[in-house]
């Protein structure tokens, strides 16, 4: 495979940086890596690819020059330290004002300011890019709408109604992927990318297709075949009873145990005093109710009116003194424990549990990082209840979650009791989004155990999806195959296409997942120098689809293009497929070197 003359400089050492480097190298792109320092991890991670490494240290300018910024086609800044990303991006833009700069920033204020510095700078936020895929997996969304040159296209996951070829079942609607056996959500699917229309499928398969709403309607395609569990609502009476029981349970769990001991002492005092007054009080005498009333009045020290001890035996008057002091002490201690419950930090934690116990058909989000809060925001904006589980009670995003009105359960999500507090046994979906793969897998298994039979899909009702954040795609596939988790998502996998596309000139329009594999929809302008100008559709990769062509000469949108349709200079090609394949097409499109344009 020929290597492109103009390099792409990747700045930073992180999971997504290595994913970008790996994919660019496999696509034949010349990559230079700039890192703050060359550690053993950096050396080991780049040994196989042979990527040149440059240590920036305190001099980013020198490192970028050594990496070839003078002739590079793009600089991608994706380190975990955003300040370093910002520095590298600004220095690169100063050295080469015309170079494409792509950087990761999650600070909205700084990101807006950077965007305003030049049209060649693209600012992306990994959490924003990856969150939609997790939200769609939680909600069971099986269709995605993409606007292409003013025409609406729909990407939909369809269950196969009967056996037959794709052509027989779906006509001219373009197939994007076939997931063998995916109709059973507990079985890992074998994915066929961009299959031919003569491929035979059966009712155990799920087919992903793309077409206009009119095309789907003409073929009588139904895109929603299973009702999400979140649509199942309990009755108001059941909800009120559940809230009352949950409130009582949480009060018992949060109160100091001595509070209940003091209540017991108070009850004993009233009971003993009732017996004594009923038997020992002289004229006019007392009923049991009178005795209870007078005992309570004495303990509360609210004074005597209808009953008093002025003409009673001395022993009974001594008893009244003891009763008043004992009652005063007991009442004071009870009020102290109540005050502790109301003003301590346990109140806020208990309030989160109380609210969670009153919820059902909600989504449980485990992990309150930048990614987790984006997912929670997205779910809430769509009208779904969200409960967050977080181990650390001092996380910087707790205030943000509080402003959104999201209940938070503080605790270890690998413990079943914590998941019960979050209502996993009543939820519509679970999203496990911590930054540790092993923790995510452990929490996923614990959630699956707690869900029991609700984990499995039934006719008309889908099983509760458990979405796992897994950084490595191979690990995600292995976990799905072994444990039945078919909703593994990697932030690096989901966000990398946007960074690579922006670096190489492909306008990424949408990304979506098919059986945990990322697909992309993008627009590629065909320039006169492009290696794709004059090429027929049948000459492109078999794992991609050109779903439409914006013609420069007529201004029309041609769809669907046929096998013999050619691309011409000035056209816009709209492609869909696995993002690795789209990068390979970009390689064919880029075939000319970049001249040295360094600005001193």
Image (spheres, helix red, strand yellow):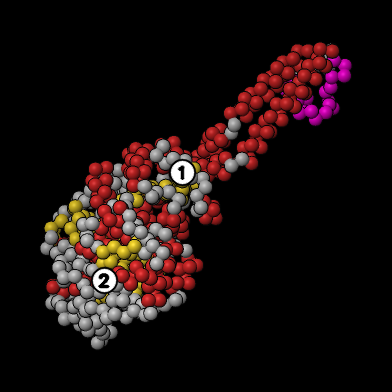
The C terminus appears in which quarter of the rendering?
Answer: bottom left
**Is 438 rendered above or below residue 331?**
below
The N terminus appears in which quarter of the rendering?
Answer: bottom left
Which residue is rendered at x = 32% and y = 81% of the image? 597
**Is 186 rendered above or below residue 174?**
above
Marks 2 and 1 in Cβ contact (< 8 Å) = no
Label annotation for residue 7: 2
Label annotation for residue 508: none
Which secondary structure lies at badge 2?
loop
Which residue is rendered at x = 44% and y = 53% of the image? 369
In this rendered view, identify the residue nearer to me: 455 or 191. Answer: 191
Which residue is rendered at x = 33% and y = 72% of the image? 65
Can residue 238 be seen by looking at this rendering?
no
Whether the magenta-drawn stretch holds residue 309 is answered as: yes
Q: Earlier in the sequence, mark 2 or mark 1?
A: 2
Q: Residues within 10 Å of mark 1 (few under 14, many from 20)?
A: some
| In the image: residue 403, left or right of residue 461 | right
Q: What is the spatial separation of the Cα atoms under label 2 and label 1, in whole angstroms? A: 43 Å
Residue underneath mark 1:
391
| Region rendered in magenta | 290-312
**Image location of residue 267, percent across then percent down:** 66, 23
Whether the magenta-drawn stretch holds residue 498 is answered as: no
């Amino acid at each position: 495979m020929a290597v492109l003359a103009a390099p792409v400089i990747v700045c930073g050492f992180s999971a997504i940086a290595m994913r970008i480097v790996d994919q660019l190298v496999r696509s034949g792109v010349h990559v230079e890596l700039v890192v703050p320092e060359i550690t053993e991890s950096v050396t080991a991670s780049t040994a196989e690819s042979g990527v040149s490494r440059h240590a920036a240290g305190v001099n980013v300018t020198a490192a970028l020059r050594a990496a070839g910024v003078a002739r590079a086609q793009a600089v991608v800044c994706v380190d975990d330290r955003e300040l370093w990303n910002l520095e590298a991006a600004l220095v690169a833009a100063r050295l080469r004002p015309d170079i494409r700069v792509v950087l990761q920033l999650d600070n909205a204020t700084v990101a807006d300011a950077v965007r305003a510095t030049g049209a060649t700078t693209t600012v992306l936020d990994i959490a924003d890019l990856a969150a939609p895929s997790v939200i769609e997996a939680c909600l069971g969304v099986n269709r995605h709408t993409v606007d292409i040159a003013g025409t609406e296209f729909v990407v939909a996951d369809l269950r196969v109604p009967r056996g037959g070829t794709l052509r027989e079942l779906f006509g001219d609607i373009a197939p994007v992927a076939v997931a063998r056996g995916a109709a059973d959500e507990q079985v890992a699917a074998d994915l066929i990318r961009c299959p031919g229309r003569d491929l035979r499928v059966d009712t155990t398969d799920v087919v992903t297709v793309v077409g206009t709403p009119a095309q789907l309607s003409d073929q009588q395609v139904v895109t929603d075949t299973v009702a999400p569990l979140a649509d199942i609502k309990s009755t108001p009476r059941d909800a009120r009873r559940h809230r009352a029981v949950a409130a009582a349970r949480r009060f018992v769990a949060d109160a100091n145990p001595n509070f209940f001991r003091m209540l017991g002492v108070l009850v004993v005092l009233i009971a003993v005093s009732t017996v004594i007054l009923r038997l020992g009080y002289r004229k006019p005498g007392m009923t049991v109710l009178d005795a209870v009333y007078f005992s309570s009045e004495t303990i509360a020290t609210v004074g005597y009116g209808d009953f008093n001890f002025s003409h009673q035996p001395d022993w009974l008057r001594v008893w009244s003194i003891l009763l008043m002091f004992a009652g005063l002490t007991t009442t004071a201690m009870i009020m102290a424990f109540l005050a502790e419950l109301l003003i301590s930090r346990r109140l806020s934690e208990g309030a989160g549990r109380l609210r969670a116990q009153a919820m059902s058909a909600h989504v449980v989000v485990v992990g309150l990082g930048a990614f987790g809060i984006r997912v929670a925001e997205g779910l809430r904006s769509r009208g779904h209840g969200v409960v967050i589980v977080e181990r650390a009670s001092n996380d910087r995003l707790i205030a943000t979650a509080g402003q959104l009105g999201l209940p938070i359960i503080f605790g270890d999500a690998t413990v079943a009791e914590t998941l019960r507090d979050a209502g996993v046994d009543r939820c519509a979906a679970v999203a496990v989004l911590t930054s540790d793969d092993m923790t995510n897998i452990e929490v996923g298994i614990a959630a699956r155990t707690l869900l029991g039979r609700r984990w499995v899909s039934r006719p008309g009702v889908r099983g509760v999806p458990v979405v796992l954040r897994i950084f490595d795609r191979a690990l995600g596939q292995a976990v799905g195959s072994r444990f039945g988790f078919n909703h593994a998502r990697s932030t690096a996998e989901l966000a990398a296409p946007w960074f690579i596309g922006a670096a190489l000139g492909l306008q990424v329009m949408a990304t979506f997942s098919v059986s945990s594999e990322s697909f992309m929809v993008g627009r590629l302008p065909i320039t006169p120098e492009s290696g794709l100008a004059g090429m027929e559709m049948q000459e492109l990769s078999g794992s991609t689809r050109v779903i439409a062509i914006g013609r420069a000469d007529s201004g029309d949108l041609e769809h669907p293009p046929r096998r013999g349709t050619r691309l011409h200079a000035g056209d816009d090609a709209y492609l869909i497929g696995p993002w690795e394949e789209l990068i390979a097409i970009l390689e064919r499109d880029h075939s000319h070197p970049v001249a040295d344009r360094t600005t001193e």
